[in-house]
Image (cartoon, rainbow, N blue to C red):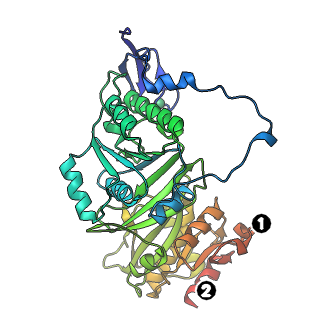
Amino acid sequence: MAKAKTAYFCQNCGYTSPKWLGKCPSCNQWNSLVEELITKDEPEKGNWRFGSMNEKPKAKPKTIQQITTAEQYRIITDDQEFDRVLGGGLVPGSLILIGGEPGIGKSTLMLQLALSLKDYNVLYISGEESEQQLKMRAQRLKFENERCYILTETSTDSIFKQIEQLEPDVVIVDSIQTMLSPLIESGAGSVSQIKECTAEFMTFAKESDVPVIMIGHITKEGSLAGPKVLEHMVDTVLTFEGDRYMAYRILRTTKNRFGSTSELGIYEMLADGLREVSNPSEILISERTEQISGISIASMMEGNRPLNVEIQSLVSTANYGTPQRTSNGFDNRRLQMLLAVLEKRGGFRLGTQDVFLNVAGGLKVEDPAIDLAVCVAVASSYEDLPVSSAFCFAAEVGLGGEVRAVSRIESRISEAAKLGFKQIFISENNLKGLDKSKFDIKIFSAEKLEQVFMELFG
Ligand SMILES: [Zn+2]
């Protein structure tokens, strides 16, 4: 047996240190380093995971001309949204991570995928649920597939033995946090276990050319439970999001070695599984009651991701001396500033009005690009004139009532177009160097707030 060896792992980013440190030098988190026992055995002889590697012929240098570029073969699934998000189907030998909050429907989506792949042997490994639970779920999904195998196991050792016998074409792991490698002594879900198990599945995928899809749970803070390192190890990272109480789910790519990261898939959660929504504009627009004033859609960035969010405002006559200004999810002082701009530059008499502002979905927005949507929502409520639900807004508003340019305008526009919006309002300055014809959405650009109001309210 190998000797026990310990190391300190940052629970936040996966940084490894031989000694304890109060602050992680990689991500600057305090008290995030945790001691974990590692005993990595020498690989056993005959273990296929390591054995086969030695027999592999060594790669030889080739000239660019010698490298053939055959069209990458992909496994096309029954799920068009899933295929699209991946960039056109499953790439053999790829390692895919699908993250999302617990209860959002990742297992349903994956079991549904497993059951729909009728021309392939699929192995669905579950460390989360019992065979009976999976059977019940499969019955609810109303899919029949004789080539979908279920294995309830958490030890990677036993899993790889089963894989060797079954020789599946696709492997699904539910979830990576429940997997246990015998090479590591720490418990399931620890950083070192997650890293090791991922490394084992990666070696398997690369050597066998079998695609592996791993489910990973996301913590409340929104990061993948486990090291950030995990995201670097895999080829593709998908996130499955949406409110668990709402019917719609969005599947996005946050990293993809085999395609673009700007694709997204939309599903509707029904009693018998997830239905692909091929025309998202329908749901986004009908979801909202048409003629309500005080509502506008803002385009914001959350990290690298563009996101469209609903801004709701209510303006009503103040009953008491000092009017109230209350906002949820938006900086109150910024709201005060925008109200002053509306008063001074737009002629809105807000001094005697209570103003309530709410960012739907409980989001907290710091992106100044939602300024314009905030102004529009307030003006819409004040005038009691609704704004079309097919419009969205992406611009900062300055003290002079000027409509200012925002970062990453192209991603915002593409996202709005993809989500089915008909028109986006941006700053004139953002228009420079922008190829309007590239986008499937009407673009309205303005220099001043008045121009936007003229266009909306006449
Ligand atoms: Zn760290």
Residue 44: percent from left, percent from top: 41, 17
Along the line of sight, the residue nearer the viewer: 183 or 398: 183
**In screen coordinates, is 102 left or right of 292?**
left
Q: Residues within 10 Å of mark 2 (few under 14, many from 20)?
A: few
Q: Which residue is drawn at 64% across and 59% down?
A: 408
Identified by mark 2, the residue type is: Glu
The residue that mark 2 highlights is 455
Q: Residue 406 carries which label?
A: none
Residue 18: percent from left, percent from top: 46, 15
Ligand 1 within 8 Å of disc 2? The answer is no
Identified by mark 1, the residue type is: Gly
Q: Residue at x 60, y 47 (%)?
A: 257
Q: Is 165 placed above or below 440 here?
A: above
Check disc 1 and report its element: helix, strand or loop.
loop
Q: Which residue is drawn at 70% across and 67% down?
A: 430
Q: Is 83 placed above or below 31 here?
A: below
The residue that mark 1 highlights is 433
Quadrant (top left/top right/bottom left/bottom right) for the N terminus = top left
Residue 420: percent from left, percent from top: 53, 76
